[in-house]
Each structure stands twice: as C-alpha cells, then as structure tokens.
Image (tube, grey):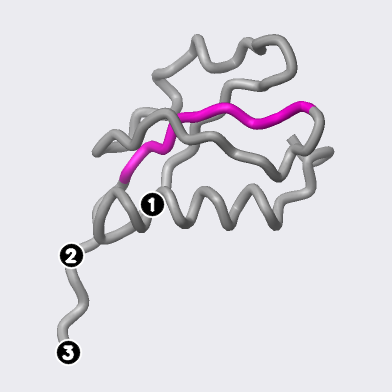
Amino acid sequence: MQNPAVQTFTVIGLRSDVDMSDLFIAGVIPGPVADEVVILKTSEEEFTRWAMEFDAPDADSAADQAYAYCQEEDPCSW
C-alpha cells in the first residue's frame, strides 16, 4: 500500500472562548499561509480567530488533525 503525497494545508477557523477545545473550521487552504493571515490575530465576541498549518494527504485529513490538536492542546499555552 502506497502513502498518498503529503502537502501543507492551512486550517482557518474559530475557537470558543468558553471551551477552547471547540474548533469551528471555516476553511482549509492549500499551502503554508497561516503567518500571512494577520487578521486572524484579533478576536470576535466569545470566539478567537485561529489558523495553523498541518501536513496531510488531503484537506479533510488536515481538518481532522486541527480538531485533534485543539482537543489535546493546553489553551493556556498560546
């Protein structure tokens, strides 16, 4: 069985300020552009805008990795 090619995706979404493990994905963009999305540093009422890059074979896998990352990450670490 051959592994599909892996590429970098940027996952963009909102994290709930009430439960930082909740991630609402707005989109997945091919390419490493999280650092260029400066506007995501601001917050919305009850939500924090969020973007991070993940290496995955497809956009759905990158979104799955983002969900898992937010479930495991210590919200105080960022």
Magenta stretch: includes residue 13: yes
- Residue under numbered circle 1: 62
Residue 67 drawn at (x, y percent): 55, 51
Q: Main secondary structure of the magenta part?
A: strand
Name the disc covering residue 1, or none. 3
The question of residue 29 being in magenta is answered with no
Q: Amino acid at mark 3?
A: Met
- Asked which secondary structure carries label 2, the reply is loop
Look at label 1 and name its amino acid. Answer: Ala
Q: Are marks 2 and 3 in contact (CB under 8 Å)?
A: no
Tell me the residue that label 2 is attached to.
5
In the image, residue 42 sits, relative to residue 16, either above or below, namely above
Q: Residues within 10 Å of mark 3 (few under 14, many from 20)?
A: few
Give the residue drawn at x 36%, y 32%.
Answer: 27
| Residue 57 pos. (x, y %) | 25, 61
Of marks 2 and 3, the one in the foreground: 3
- Residue for point 50% across, 29% down: 13
Q: Is residue 49 above or below residue 32?
A: above
Q: Is residue 19 left or right of residue 60?
A: right
Provide the residue span drawn in magenta: 9-17
| Left or right of 20 on screen, residue 30 | left
